[in-house]
Amino acid sequence: MSISTGLAGIAVLLVLLALRVPVAVALILVSFGGIWLMLGFEPAVGILTTTPYDFVASWTLSAVPMFLLMGFVAYHAGLTTNLFAAANRALRRVPGGLGMAGVLACTGFASVSGSSLACAAAMGRIAIPEMIRAGYRPSFATGTLAAGGTIGALIPPSILMIIYGVFAEASVTKVFLGGISVGLMTAATYCLMIFAVARLRPEIMPTPDTHDPAQAHATVFKAIWPLLTLIFLVFGGLFGGLFTATEAGAIGAAGAIVIACLTRALSWQGFRAALLETVGTSVSLFIIGVGAVMFTRFLGLSGTAGFISQTVNAWDVGYLEMMMMIVALYVVLGMFMEPFGAMLITLPILLPLLEAASVSLVWFGVLLVKLLEVGMITPPLGMNVFVIRNVAGQYAGLGDIFRGVTLFLLADMVIVALLIAFPELILAIAEPGG
């Protein structure tokens, strides 16, 4: 073991990331170089050649491309386009109803997406123009959809949660169940905040339109039945114990294709685009995962992971202090890194600490995804904000959008505090009686 080599490797990794070296490349280079220094060239090459297969061959991990395919097929077939209209009809008479409809549409899209970027982009294109035309202040309209997009990684099938479950050896289904509670809590909190703003600051959004023709109402809700059928098929079977998360991914992908074909909504060009996007996204995620596994082995061989765990334990840090440090860590990382990189770089160091403190890895997985999604709207590099800037840049600049997400960031931190103070908010659903 060589703790000094491990600590030096962490330092080099941080430097490479600061220089904007891709996360996967930085992880693989540092791990390969560190193992080479400690054990020699041949062991380093051996780990480099075996790790990709060992990681990618995971049965649970095969759910990632399947859920991605389900989401891309649903998107290209237009199965999600009527979500906003349906939510708007339901909330038409409520103050702030159009903003709430954007949040609820993001929640619905999340159930077939698993990505906050995709959620923000898809719903932002649909909802923001409608909100601006209705008289919403542009900064608030764009901020609402940037924040609403973060629900995309909380509501299953969350790709972040699948990767976490594989990496932490935690039940993906249990993490999914916890994600539902936090995702719905986030959506409800956002809606309550929008309602409060509508009441206290009426100049930010207009008075609700009470005109609600029955025919339009029925037509809009009829249009979302294919998506509701897909959601019921996948999650009814998953949480009903009929099939595993991996099987749910395959059934979801097949179900999306069948429904899209039956409704004649999917063209060959759309299907081809869905396949290409699935392959591209899966490959990029898997390469980062391979680098993270190599980095974990490097830290284990050098003894660094155990050293850090023993050092923190020697400080006699309490539960709240440890959680405050973890929250601060991910808030800072979220300012500069994308979620997958931030998660997979830190887990090799944090998991031994959490296991030593007897912290539920299912609970932590859900909390971690929430923290990573907070980073998606945190300046200066909140990725959801940049996505919204790309799809609605004619309405608001980056500064306006960041101002628009401020209240949502405050709401997120309240939710994080509640999850830390009351872990049963997650565990009562994810691990009842556990």
Image: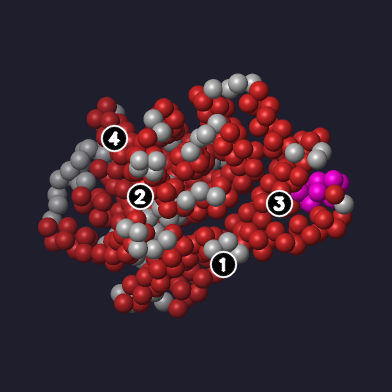
User: Mark 4 packing: few (<14 Cα in 10 Å), some, or many (20+)?
Assistant: some
Is label 1 in a helix, a strand or a loop?
helix
Tell me the quarter of the image containing the C terminus. top left
User: Mark 1 packing: few (<14 Cα in 10 Å), some, or many (20+)?
Assistant: some
Considering depth in this image, is 81 or 107 the residue closer to the camera? 107
Q: Position of residue 290 (x, y in %)?
A: 66, 56
Residue type (three-letter) at the residue carrying disc 2:
Thr
N-term-proximal mark, 4 vs 3 = 4
Q: Which residue is mark 2?
A: 107
Residue 354 occupies quadrant: top right
Considering depth in this image, is 18 or 237 the residue closer to the camera? 237
Residue type (three-letter) at the residue carrying disc 4:
Leu
Q: Position of residue 375 (x, y in %)?
A: 52, 39
State yes or no: discs 4 and 1 in contact (Cβ < 8 Å): no
- Magenta-span inclusion, residue 33: yes
Q: Which residue is mark 1?
A: 279
Is label 2 in a helix, a strand or a loop?
helix
Q: Which residue is mark 3?
A: 294
Q: Is residue 71 above or below residue 203?
A: below
Q: Is residue 236 left or right of residue 290?
A: left
N-term-proximal mark, 1 vs 2 = 2
State yes or no: discs 4 and 3 in contact (Cβ < 8 Å): no
N-term-proximal mark, 2 vs 3 = 2
Please identify, in this view, whether the residue under mark 1 or under mark 3 is nearer the observer. Answer: 3
Please identify, in this view, whether the residue under mark 4 or under mark 1 is nearer the observer. Answer: 1
Is label 4 in a helix, a strand or a loop?
helix
Q: Position of residue 247 (x, y in %)?
A: 43, 65
Q: Which residue is mark 4?
A: 192
Distance from disc 1 to disc 3, alpha carbons, whole Å, reads 22 Å
**Residue at position x 26%, y 51% in the image:** 87
Taking the view exactly as shown, the residue that stands out farthest to the front is 433
Q: Which residues are magenta?
A: 29-38
